Image: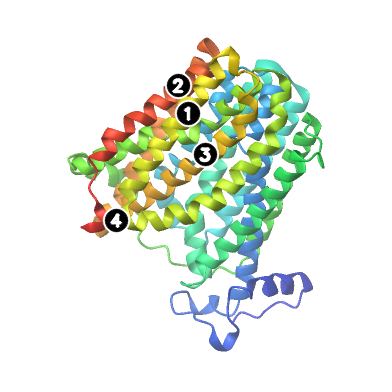
């Protein structure tokens, strides 16, 4: 029988968890092990604290904005800056095919999450040291290498988290736990953006390097806190090798025309995730003062996440196809305008002022792509095959993202306006593909 510890610190986490978990008389524990019922409030508090720390760390290092700014400040090549987002996203995704079934066989998965977060902490600290000690191409490519290590740690944390959450928090409370952590981290991101925008924190290299150090400490704290969870051993049945499942089902999956169209559209719309660093760089090409708007970009990102997620989510329940189409049209328009304004000399002084607003609109489109693709795949895939559809789609996109890292070379050769123009064309090409998708919510 679990006994709530008397340690005052643990009582703090229990109090935090009580915000989303009922008192003992009303507590629901039907879908978690019996031994996990009593420690639910403490577990919920530890989940909230750990997730808030890692999500706040994400805001401090932001591979779409903060790391590109730092790499630009040390004179790293555009090719290194351009590979940050695709490398971070793809390497957090692809290894899960090889590790998911092994993690599933472990009696306790909290140690995997903690180990992955510890790797992230070390990698972020190493990025800060690299950017402090080196400049130019060496600093850029070493940072890319450490980001790859970071992404592998993120992969371990991602593949283990849902299992731990499912074993320690009852159904009906899990969304509240992750949602509260997300809201707290969003408030932190807003505060960080406001501090940089209004000069509370000077927008200088030492300040952002300090932010990386704080982020590393946040991941280290999160790793430690997660080890304190009370996770009952077991629930390690159903360990399926994702790679084997894809290999066995690949032919049947690819024969599904709607699934092919969905993968093609999702691949084309990865430009909404890849474009932000180039928008930031394009705003700075008219002069280093333009990069002083990093705080405005961070604010735009936070506001877009808050404004876009709920609205696009509601619309996706009506027609995920139209959400994807509207997002594609919006992205194509914003990226096309960005390419034109950043390319032509008469607009050089105007574009840095417009770029944060363009970034806000692009992030709104990105939120639409995220909500639309998740809802469309969930509603399109047969219930028994949903996991395989998801694994195949994620694998395909991981490969696409790795390939798209080559756009950094285009930026080195032709400049960032050329990359933005290419991204606009890819988003435009998604429209005829998406038009052929079924209205899956009506089927």
Cβ atoms at labels 1 and 3 below 8 Å apart: no
Q: Is residue 254 visible?
A: yes
Q: Secondary structure at mark 2?
A: helix
Separation of disc 1 and disc 2 at Cα? 7 Å
10 Å crowding of disc 3: few (<14), some (14-19), many (20+):
many
- Residue 335 shows which numbered tag? 1
Counting from the top left corner in percent of width and height, residue 250 is at 23, 41
Residue shown at 57%/65% (left/top)?
177
Quick check: 228 left or right of 93? right
Q: Which residue is mark 4?
A: 379
Separation of disc 2 and disc 4 at Cα? 33 Å
Q: Is residue 219 visible?
A: no
In the foreground, 371 or 194: 194
Point out the tag, 4 or 3, that comes first from the N-terminus.
Answer: 3
- Seen as rendered, the residue at the extreme top is 413
- Residue 421 shows which numbered tag? 2
């Amino acid at each position: 029988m679990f006994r709530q510890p008397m340690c005052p610190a643990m009582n703090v986490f229990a109090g935090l968890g009580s915000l989303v978990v009922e008192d003992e008389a009303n507590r629901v524990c039907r879908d978690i092990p019996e031994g996990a019922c009593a420690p639910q409030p403490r577990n919920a508090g530890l989940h909230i604290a750990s997730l808030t720390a890692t999500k706040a760390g994400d805001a401090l290092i932001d591979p779409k904005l903060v790391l590109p700014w730092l790499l630009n400040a040390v004179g790293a090549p555009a090719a290194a800056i351009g590979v940050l987002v695709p490398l971070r996203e793809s390497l957090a995704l692809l290894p899960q095919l090889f590790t998911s079934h092994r993690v599933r066989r472990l009696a306790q998965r909290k140690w995997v999450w903690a180990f992955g977060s510890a790797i992230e902490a070390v990698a972020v600290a190493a990025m800060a040291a690299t950017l402090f000690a080196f400049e130019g191409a060496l600093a850029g490519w070493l940072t890319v290498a450490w980001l790859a290590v970071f992404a592998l740690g993120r992969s371990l944390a991602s593949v283990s988290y849902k299992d731990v959450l499912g074993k320690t928090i009852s159904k009906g409370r899990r969304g509240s736990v992750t949602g509260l952590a997300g809201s707290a981290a969003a408030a932190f991101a807003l505060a960080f953006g406001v501090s940089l925008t209004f000069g509370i924190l000077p927008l200088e290299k030492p300040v952002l390097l300090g932010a990386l150090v704080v982020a590393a400490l946040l991941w280290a704290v999160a790793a430690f806190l997660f080890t304190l969870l009370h996770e009952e051993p077991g629930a390690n049945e159903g360990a399926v090798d994702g790679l084997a499942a894809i290999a066995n089902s690949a032919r049947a999956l690819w024969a599904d025309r709607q699934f092919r169209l969905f993968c093609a559209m999702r691949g084309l719309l990865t430009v909404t995730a890849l474009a932000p660093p180039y928008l930031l760089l394009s705003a700075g090409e008219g002069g280093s003062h333009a990069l002083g708007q990093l705080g405005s970009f961070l604010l735009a990102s936070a506001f877009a996440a808050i404004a876009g997620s709920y609205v696009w989510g509601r619309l996706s329940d009506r027609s995920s196809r139209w959400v994807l189409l509207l997002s594609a049209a919006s992205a194509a328009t914003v990226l096309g305008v960005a390419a034109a304004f950043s390319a032509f000399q008469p607009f050089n002084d105007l574009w840095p002022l417009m770029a944060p607003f363009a970034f806000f609109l692009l992030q709104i489109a990105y939120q639409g792509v995220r909500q639309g693709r998740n809802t469309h795949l969930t509603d399109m895939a047969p219930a028994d095959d949903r996991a395989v559809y998801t694994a195949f789609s994620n694998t395909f996109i991981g490969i696409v993202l790795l390939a798209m890292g080559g756009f950094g070379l285009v930026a080195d050769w032709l400049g960032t306006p050329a990359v933005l123009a290419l991204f606009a064309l890819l988003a435009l090409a998604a429209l005829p593909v998406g038009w052929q998708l079924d209205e899956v919510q009506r089927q």
